[in-house]
Amino acid sequence: MSALGKLMNALQILPGVGPKTAQRMTFYLLQKNRPGAEKLAEILKQACETIRQCDRCRTLTENRLCRICASSDRDESLLCVVESPAELMQIEQATGFNGKYFVLHGRLSPLDGMGPAELGFHQLVDIMSRENTRELIIATNATIEGETTARYLAQMAAGVGIKTTRLAHGVPLGGELEYTDANTLAHAFSHREPVE
């Protein structure tokens, strides 16, 4: 296979990039922005060589501990479990959460080979016990696998006497009931809260 074909195939590993998009990206990089392509290749190579999982929370970092785990200003009694480093970053940017995290790098899915060992559940139990966790905040996605993972995590936390909470799901802020899908509306309706 030619170098051009190899590059087009390599770009297709990115989510949402099919053959046509990969072809457009390849021609753009080689025809219109060769210096940008060289810089991208250099930065990607460097990132692959230096970025690893944090020893404690498993997010991506260049150091043994990420900046959150290394911080003494974070509340160790609050532990938020997310499926990916991208979700950790989203929570950090959108909320004032000042606790610590644990990144699963997936969700329970036996068909995909993702079980408790692959998700680091033993490490999570160790963290909850060692750091005197008071509350486990489960922030898995509202998918069947995410909900299964949440239930499993809640049972684990209950086994070591830790309070468990789950992110709220339902009608989005500013959303209109008329345009809300049936599953979201049913979930929001069955988990309604008192008005204060």
Image: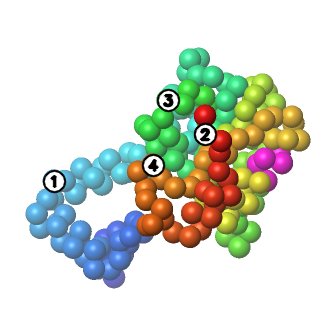
What residue is rendered at 43% in x and 59% in y? Answer: 176
Q: Residue furthest right?
A: 159
The secondary structure type at the circle numbered 4 is: loop
Q: Which residues are magenta?
A: 152-156
Tell me the chief SS of the magenta region.
helix
* Of the pair 136 and 70, the residue shown nearer to us: 136
**Sooner in the amino-acid sequence: mark 3 or mark 4:** 3
Residue that numbered label 2 is attached to:
195
Q: Earlier in the sequence, mark 2 or mark 4?
A: 4
Residue 39 visible in rendering: yes
**Mark 1 and mark 2 in contact (Cβ < 8 Å)?**
no
**Which marked residue is nearer to the observer: mark 3 or mark 4?**
4
Query: Quick one: label 3 or label 1, which is nearer the N terminus?
Result: 1
In reply to whether residue 161 is colored magenta, the answer given is no
Given the current orientation, which residue lies at the most extreme left position?
32
Disc 3, SS: loop
Image coordinates of residue 170 in percent, x first then y, are 56, 55
- Foreground disc of the pair 2, 4: 2
Kindly identify which residue carries mark 3. 96
Label whose residue precedes the other's in the sequence (2 or 1) = 1
Q: CA distance from mark 2 to mark 1?
A: 58 Å
Residue reaching furthest to the top: 72
Q: Find out whether the residues at labels 3 and 4 contact each other: C-beta distance under 8 Å.
A: no
According to the picture, the residue beneath numbered tag 1 turns out to be 35
Dot 1 surroundings within 10 Å: few (below 14), some, or many (20 or more)? few
Three-letter code, disc 4: Leu
Q: Secondary structure at mark 2?
A: loop
Up-down: is 2 above or below 90?
A: below
- Residue 175, by quadrant, is bottom left
Residue type, numbered disc 2 = Val
Q: Nearer the viewer, mark 1 or mark 4?
A: 4
